[in-house]
Amino acid sequence: MVEKKKKLGCLLFFVMICFFVSVFFNPRICSAEDIGTESLVTVSDDASLLAEGEIKKLQDMGEKLAEKSGWNVIVSTCDDTAGRTAQTTCEDYFNTYTTGDNGISCLVDMDHREIYLSTAGDAILYLNDKRIDEILDQAYEAVSEGDYAQCLSSMISGAEEAYKAGVPDNAVIYDEDTGERTVNRKLTRMEILIALLFGCAAGGIVFASILGKYRLKWGTYRYDFHDSGVLSLDKKEDRFVNQVVTHRKLPQNNGSTSSSGSRNKSTVHTGSGGRKFGGGGRRF
């Protein structure tokens, strides 16, 4: 009986290792493709620049990106910003039509003749400053020729390509309001697997040590908590006294040679509604 239970324990341990390996080496198991896309995509043509078929195409492209990433995708045009900048208008569209914190907002602003791409939440890491500039280069070519649908389409497809490429290694988020830099270091799958193996090995050693120390036999040992157990209740109260937060502004590197961190930098600011946004624009 003891030998059978030992074999069962080894089998369960092997199954658990296989499960963790399958999760980390097959990202589709936990993919955002299973997330519903209802209300994640909005196309708002307030400037009446798009034909009905173009709106449908942009809606389909947005839903495809939302299905893969779980992001909100807002696509809009306007001809009156009511005194707001293109940046603020683009962020306002995101806050108006979204229910989540992650995603992009694409805008063609005819009032200022400017295109703008805003990022929020997880999208900030995928769409860093360099990638946004590349997307805007493509979008500018289309909008300068009066092809507004292609301009917005380029923004969506560029965001999708950035998502497929993944978060760059050692991505840096630079907050231009505070001057703080946050490095988002990514663990590799091998590092995660090694950590899991070490954790399982440590747990197995502790388990075997306790089993050997007390010479417990499977199914025969029973702890009598009525005679051996002791219950002691103590009253404990926590009081928050004070909290001190220190902010330190780091100087920007203005040299011509950029490091890996600066190449992977995402600049953010406190934007519309108090939300942190990244992004960029281009006048045409």
Image: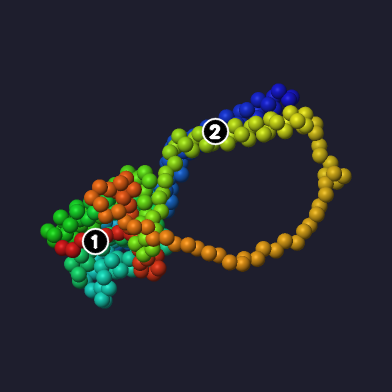
Identify the residue shown where x is 49% and y is 35%. Answer: 193
Q: Could you classify mark 2 by the number of other residues whose Cα lies within 10 Å: few (under 14), some (14-19), or many (20 or more)?
A: some
Where is residue 45 shown, x and y percent of the image? 25, 66
Q: Is residue 268 left or right of residue 205?
A: left
Where is residue 57 shown, x and y percent of the image? 25, 55
What is the residue that sits farthest to the bottom in this orientation?
Answer: 82
Identify the residue shown where x is 54% and y is 36%. Answer: 196
Q: Quadrant for the N terminus, please.
A: top right
Q: Secondary structure at mark 1?
A: strand
Q: Quadrant for the C terminus, please.
A: bottom left
Could you say which quadrant of the image residue 269 lies in? bottom left
Q: Nearer the viewer, residue 41 or 84?
A: 84
Q: Tag 1: residue type? A: Gly
Q: Tag 2: residue type? A: Leu
Could you say which quadrant of the image residue 76 lies in? bottom left
Where is residue 183 shown, x and y percent of the image? 40, 50
Identify the residue shown where x is 19% and y is 54%. Answer: 137
**Residue 197, which numbered label?**
2
Q: Nearer the viewer, residue 18 or 47?
A: 18
**Residue 281, which numbered label?**
1
